[in-house]
Image (cartoon, rainbow, N blue to C red):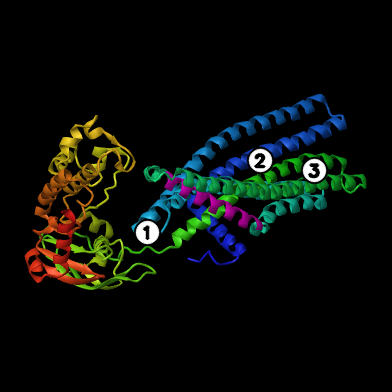
Amino acid sequence: MPPFRGTCCVHIDMNVYSRLLFYVSEIKREVIVKTVLMLLVSAASIAQAILMSRTVNSVFEGSPVRQVLILLAGVVVAIAVRCLVLRFNETYTKTMAASIKEKLRLSILDKVFQLGPGYMSEKRSGKVTSLILDGVESLEPFFVRYIPQILTVILSGGFVFVYLARYDLVSSFILLISMILCVVVPLITVPIMSRSVDDYWTQYSQMTSQYIDAVQGMTTLKTLNAEGPMGMVLYKNATDFWHRSIRNTGISLTNSSLMIVLSVITSSLTVVVAAIRSQNGAIPVAAVSAFLFLAVECSKPMTELNNAWHASFLGISVARDMFDMIAVDPPVKQPKHPVRAKFEEPLPTVAFQNVSFSYPEREEVLHQLDFTIDSGSMTAIVGRSGAGKSTILNLILRFYDVTSGCIQINGVELQKFDLESLRDQIAVVFQDTFLFCGTIEDNIRMANPGATGEDVISAAKAAYAHDFIMQLPDGYKTVVGERGYTLSGGERQRISIARAFLKKAPLLLLDEATSSVDAHSEELVQKAIKELTNHCTTVVIAHRLSTIYDADKIIVLENGQIAEQGDHKTLMDRNGIYAELIRAQKEAAQ
């Protein structure tokens, strides 16, 4: 896929333009229907113009009144047909726009899911949100208006040229040239428009990101009494965006006005040339009225094409960001011949064999790790902040692939497993539980969409969450707020554990699941976790070391390497880093 950044504006935009045209092949049915409707509208307008021309000629020639009335009736029919088709066209336009935007959004969202947490951790969520929502809205005019309008101008313009060429080839060529210019000139102005619109979209994305940060960080801003400084930042962003908008509108209107003037001048010139040639006897007088009415009808689709182009230019700028995202290779890829993961019998054994890993453009995080997590055992991973503990879980989940070495589950390399089936076999309880805006029942059921209501309740009971859920106003039907902030940290953790119970996965990953809960909640969470770990292989990232005394194996990381490993007693007797961490926590608790 060709790069789009770091090259000249014309090259960039023509690349984007051609790729957008390629996407038209994916929606050709919608484009064809829309073009046919617009051609019918244009045909009715052309028929009206031809009939009006003949009506005028009939009046000047002194034709019978009956003939004039028949021609006028034809004009009325043409107007009625145009109105009827316009109504269907407007209705279909809305349907087509909704369909195209749905396909685009699903395509972008699918790519975001492919890129995974690693990509999103390096991007501002506001920018991605702007692309999926407002960016796709900006692409609508290109597909719904501009592409069908180009086809309409070419086909209807071609017919008008052939029809008028019968009267006078010279005047017809002037009209044809004006139509060609209306298609070509906007493309020539791409470099000027590109810089303006790029600035506009960049500023808009940044402003959206800042506003989302401010809303999500409202509690922090209030606590730090920082609403004023943040308000000034948002005010500056809004002001900058306003200036960009005015500048962008000014350039767009100037360009649009030039196109309108060009269309009017060439249409008028066509009629003038036809009149002069009629006066010189080169064409009949009756032909002038045909040029007069049809030149006006030709200018209408050309003006609409110009409007559609300017309305779609922001979308072309947005498309560059969209294609940039699509061009990014996912950090992990589905194998060509995937192995379906099924770890229930026996329970999974996870082996790290000389594993090293570094995040993109960063120093090595893990260095030559060599250890085994035995089937059905509980293995705890401890160490100071930044030692690489959570990275190990990310590698098991295959959010990233190892830089060197390999990870095996039951003797099969992790990279050979089908990604979806692999993650189906893993349950995770993170330190920071994410709940979606919806009911508690729906949030628990996400772990197993096919679960019944009874299954959800059983999982909640096993996670010691049932009692507090039943105390809520609507029980399991209670709607939790965004990110679940209407619940306490301990309650959110127990819902996360309920998900793990409901999923019944043979491999369980616990990422500091009790580090941010109070003593009462920790006791309940620990009881739930103990029951949960009885039937699976468990990997625990521990902050509170008192929770892993019973672990079968404890691995101590230091600077991305294994410093010690063994059970609690063995490591305490060794009096090394682990024993030092235990003493430090006990002293801090006193």
Q: Position of residue 66 (x, y in %)?
A: 78, 25
Farthest residue in the right direction?
280
Q: Which mark is residue 164?
A: none
Quadrant of the snapshot with the C terminus:
bottom left
Q: Picture quarter containing residue 111?
A: bottom left
Q: Position of residue 571 (x, y in %)?
A: 10, 68
Name the residue that disc number 2 marks.
42
Q: Residues within 10 Å of mark 1 (few under 14, many from 20)?
A: many
Separation of disc 3 and disc 1 at Cα? 58 Å
Q: Position of residue 329 (x, y in %)?
A: 40, 64
Q: Which residue is depicted at the point 74% across and 37% down?
A: 49
Q: Which of marks 2 and 3 precedes in the sequence? A: 2
* Image position of 393 (left or right of 289): left
- Magenta residue span: 192-214
Q: Which residue is depicted at the point 22% across and 42% down?
A: 491
* Image position of 285 (left or right of 10): right
Separation of disc 3 and disc 2 at Cα? 16 Å
Q: Which mark is residue 115?
A: 1
Q: Amino acid at mark 1?
A: Leu
Any part of residue 252 in sight: yes
* Residue nearest the observer in this picture, 184 or 466: 466
* Residue nearest the observer in this picture, 30 or 249: 249
Q: Which residue is depicted at the point 17% across and 56% down?
A: 544
Report helix, strand or loop for mark 2.
helix
Report helix, strand or loop for mark 1.
helix
Name the residue that disc number 3 marks.
291
